[in-house]
Every structure is written in C-alpha cells, then in structure tokens.
C-alpha cells in the first residue's frame, strides 16, 4: 500500500491506539482525532470522555503524532440520539452503535478527516476491508478474531465509506493487540475495554431512560391474559429480558407451556395499544422462538441487494451465524430460518453474511413463528 495521510479515530482505548501504531509503522502519515459525541453530564461517574481524551493524548504523545479534539455532540444528538429515543418510545429496541457508525464515525468524522487532507481514515474496529478483484467492489469482512468481530455494527457502510477506511486490528486477535500495546509501552495497554453505549456508559439503563422518556406503568400478563405483575413502562423492557420483572408466583405455574413450576419468566411481547407487557415461562417458550422476520431500512455494502437465496444472518451481536433464506419484501427484505431464533427483537439489526463477507442488513420490523403470524 502506498504511503498515505491517514486520520485515526483515537478513542482512548487500546484498539485505536494500536491501530495508529501499526499505520505509523507502515510508513503512513498518521493524525489522531478524538471524537466527543456526548456532552450531557459528561463529568459524572458514568461518562468518561474527559478521562478518555487524556488517555488518547497520552497515546499520541508516545507515538509522536498530532491529536485533535473534535466535538460531534450536536450531530450525534440530531442523527443518533433523537432516533434512539423515537424507537424506544415506539416500543422497539434500537441499536445506536449501528447508527453511530453510519452517521458519526464514518460520515461526520470521515467528512472532517477529508477536510484535513486525509486520504484514508482508520478506527480500532475488528473488521476488514477487501477489494474484490473480479467486481472491483469493496467488501466488508469479519474480523479474524471471532470473539471480537464487529462487522455487525458496521453493516451500513457504503462503497464510498469502505473505499476510504482501514481496519488494521481486524487482522489480529485481541490478545495480539494487547501484546503489541505492552511491547511498545502504550500507557493504556491494560485499560479495560469500554462497554455499553457512549451516552449511557456504565450507568443503570432504566435510570438513564427515565430522564428522557415518559413512562406509563401497566400490567404484566401471561399468555392467558392473567395479570402476574406490573411494569414501569414498556420502553424499559426488551424481548428476552429475564431480570427486573418482579413477577410473583402463580399457583398453577407448572401448567404454563415451555417451563415447569420454577422456570424463569421472560419478556415475550409488547402490546403498545393496551400498554401491556406479555411474559412467558421457560427459555424455549414458543412465543420466544421465531422462524421468520421482515426488515426495513435496508442498507447493502455493495449498493444493491444480494440475490435471493441461502445465506447466514445475525439478529443480534454475539450470536452464531444462523442459516437463512433471503427473499424480497415490501420496503425491505425477509429472512426465513430453518432453526428457530430466540427473542428476535424489532428495532435491532438483521445482518446478512456470505461466509466471511458482511453483505449489509436492515432493521427488524416484524417476526413470526413460521405459521403465518408474521
């Protein structure tokens, strides 16, 4: 690869730090940018952007590269957070990391980097980009570390974005990244990986949503319509949720399908019109299993939908690829799974794969058991 001016998103974490090191080692002119995407209460115990910037600046100092602090908080609030709230208020469970990548890290950040004269941008994501010799198209590939692959979160990237992007650590295992960081004495070599959404941080999720979403308490009912508890607001629950339901016992619990007398309860459905949360007993209850889904707002890395046929898909991050059949559907696409998928959740992303190639995906709109109830 010819030597280029590459702008790296330095987050303060070890992955982006090693990304910058590897690119500099390859002879590129490397510039770091720290993205500040959230301003509300960022001096609290839950938001660590100030600490992260100090870590990113320390890395830049060790590597001998420039770093710029850029505030994208307004863009983030308009393009990511507003949509996040709309989806939760509609009873769905969105994935803001997917939207953040598409709208901030590979749009606002990319645009800013280009204004700085960058030829490429790079981030610490565990994924890869390859140009197909036959078609000339850029392909998004899974990261080589199966435990860290982040292609699921990047599936909305376009040809224009992929053409400008490098993912150096996607070629490595996480253990190798840690070793490199330790070998070159990076100050954040042992820093714990961040978890959760940047604007929520490590805080209790319900506590955060309470500040932005009005909540209307209502009944929790079982599959027969019997009230078994009370919820604090439908927005605060997600399908498959087991903890925090506060459901008491029922005398004839053992008669419930999918579980015995002491089987746990899971959120299975939301009835928005009636403000009722439906819970069922047993991990494998039929209400938690789906053979079909439809997705909307589709985005394909190649710029067009793949041909109908057999592929693999993920309906949530950190699940094994599941065999499926793709077909067209109004406003999007449909997937049929020979093996039932557990707690497929509207608002989350259904991401399609052809082997190691991430093809793209869409937002899950509806699910079905395969018996005509989609």
Image (tube, rainbow, N blue to C red):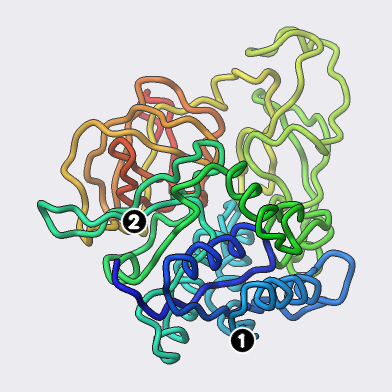
Callout 2: helix, strand or loop? Answer: strand
Q: Which mark is residue 50?
A: none
In the picture provided, is 237 more to the left or to the right than 20?
right
The residue that disc 1 covers is 68
Q: Residues within 10 Å of mark 2 (few under 14, many from 20)?
A: many
- The mark total stands at 2
Callout 1: helix, strand or loop? Answer: strand
> Could you give the CA–CA distance between mark 1 and mark 2, rounded to whole angstroms?
26 Å
Residue toward you, 79 or 196: 196
**Residue at (50%, 53%) from the top-left corner?**
169
**Residue at (48%, 66%) from the top-left corner?**
25
Q: Which one is earlier in the sequence, the residue at label 1 or at label 2?
A: 1
In the picture provided, is 238 more to the left or to the right than 262?
left
Residue 117 appears anywhere in the view: yes
Q: Is residue 139 above or below residue 279?
A: below
Residue 358 in the image: state x and y as whole percent: 34, 47
Q: Is residue 128 above or below residue 31?
A: above
Residue toward you, 24 or 137: 24
**Residue at (51%, 25%) from the top-left corner?**
289
Residue toward you, 289 or 271: 289
Residue 51 in the image: state x and y as whole percent: 80, 72
Residue 374 in the image: state x and y as whole percent: 39, 36
Q: Is residue 336 above or below residue 171?
A: above
The residue that disc 2 covers is 129
Residue toward you, 81 or 195: 195
Residue 237 in the image: state x and y as whole percent: 71, 46
């Amino acid at each position: 690869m010819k030597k280029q001016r590459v702008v790296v998103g330095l987050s303060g974490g070890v992955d982006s730090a090693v990304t910058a090191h590897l690119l500099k080692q390859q002879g590129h002119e490397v510039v770091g940018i720290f993205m500040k995407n959230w301003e509300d209460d960022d001096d609290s115990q839950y938001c660590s952007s100030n600490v992260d910037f100090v870590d990113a600046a320390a890395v830049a100092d060790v590597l001998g590269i420039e770093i710029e602090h850029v505030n994208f908080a307004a863009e983030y609030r308009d393009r990511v957070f507003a949509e996040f709230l709309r989806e939760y208020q509609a009873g769905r469970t969105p994935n803001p990391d997917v939207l953040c990548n598409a709208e901030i890290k590979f749009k606002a950040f990319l645009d800013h980097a280009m204004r700085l004269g960058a030829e490429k941008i790079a981030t610490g994501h565990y994924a890869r980009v390859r140009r197909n010799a036959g078609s000339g198209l850029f392909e998004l590939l899974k990261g080589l570390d199966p435990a860290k692959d982040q292609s699921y979160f990047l599936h909305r990237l376009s040809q224009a974005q992929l053409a400008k992007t490098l993912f150096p650590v996607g070629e490595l295992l996480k253990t190798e990244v840690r070793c490199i960081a330790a070998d070159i004495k990076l100050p954040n070599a042992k820093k714990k990986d961040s978890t959760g959404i940047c604007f929520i941080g490590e805080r209790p999720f319900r506590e955060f949503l309470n500040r932005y979403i009005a909540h209307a308490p209502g009944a929790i009912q079982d599959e027969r319509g019997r009230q078994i508890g009370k919820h604090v607001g439908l927005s605060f629950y997600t399908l498959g949720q087991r903890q925090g339901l506060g459901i008491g016992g029922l005398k004839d619990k053992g008669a419930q399908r999918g579980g015995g007398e002491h089987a746990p309860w899971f959120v299975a459905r939301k009835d928005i019109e009636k403000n009722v949360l439906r819970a069922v007993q047993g991990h494998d209850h039929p209400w938690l299993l789906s053979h079909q889904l439809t997705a909307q707002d589709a985005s394909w890395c190649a710029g067009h939908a793949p041909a109908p046929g057999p592929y693999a898909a993920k309906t949530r991050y950190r699940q094994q690829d599941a065999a499926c059949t793709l077909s067209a559907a109004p406003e999007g696409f449909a997937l049929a799974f020979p093996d039932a998928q557990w707690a497929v959740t509207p608002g989350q992303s259904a991401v399609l794969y052809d082997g190691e190639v991430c093809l793209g995906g869409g937002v899950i709109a509806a699910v079905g058991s395969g018996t005509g109830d989609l």
